[in-house]
Image: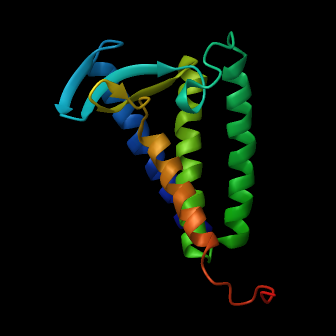
Amino acid sequence: MLNRWLWLSALVIVFDQSSKLWITNHFAYGESLPVLGIFNLVLAHNTGAAFSFLSDAGGMQRWLFGSIAIVVSVWIVWLLRRHSAQTLFALALSLILGGALGNLIDRIAYGYVVDFLSFHWGEHYFPAFNLADSAITCGAFLMILDSFKERKHGPAAG
C-alpha cells in the first residue's frame, strides 16, 4: 500500500512542477495577470519559507530549508511505511511529502521557490504561493482532521 501513497506524492510533484514551468515560460518576473476580482496569477520568487520567512537571510536559508525538507521527507516515508493502512493519515502525509519535494526541487534548481497564485482583498494581498504549498496546507488540515478521529485501540479517555 505504500506505493499508492508514493504515487500520489509523485503526482503532486508533477502537477506542481508543470504549473511552475508553465508560469515561468509565460510570465516575466513580477508580471501579474488579474483572473478574478480577488485572484491574480503572478510570477514571484520566494527565497525564504512560508510568508517569505528568512527571505533576506543571505542565502543560508536555501540550504537550511533544503536540509529540513530532506529530513522531513525521509521521516514521512518512514511514517507512510508504518501507517499506510490509515487512509486519512497516509493521504495527509502523501500531500505533505509531494509538496515538500516540489518546493525542494525549486530550491535546488533555482535557489528560490516559484510562487504564482496571488489572492487579495482590495489592496490587501496574501503572500503568493504555489500548488506544492497548497498540497502541504491540505495535508496539514487532513492531519489535524485525522487527529480528531476516534481511535479504536487507543488508551481510554480518563
7 to 109, vertically: above or below:
below
Residue plotted at (56% across, 24% down): 52
Give x and y (percent) for residue 3: 57, 64
Q: Quadrant of residue 85?
A: bottom right
- Residue at 61% across / 67% down in the picture? 2
At horizontal 74% and vertical 32% (from top left) the residue drawn is 67
Q: Residue at x 26, y 34 (%)?
A: 39
| Quadrant of the rendering where the C terminus is positioned | bottom right
Res 138 visible: yes
Q: Is residue 150 left or right of residue 156?
A: left
Residue 83: quarter of image:
bottom right
Horizontal relation, residue 89 to residue 138: left or right: right
User: With respect to residue 8, does 58 lie above or below?
Assistant: above
Percent of width and height locating residue 48: 60, 23
Which residue is nearer to you in this view: 120 or 50? 120
Determine whether 54 is above or below 40 in the image. above
Q: Can residue 1 be seen here?
A: no
State whether residue 125 is above or below residue 90: above
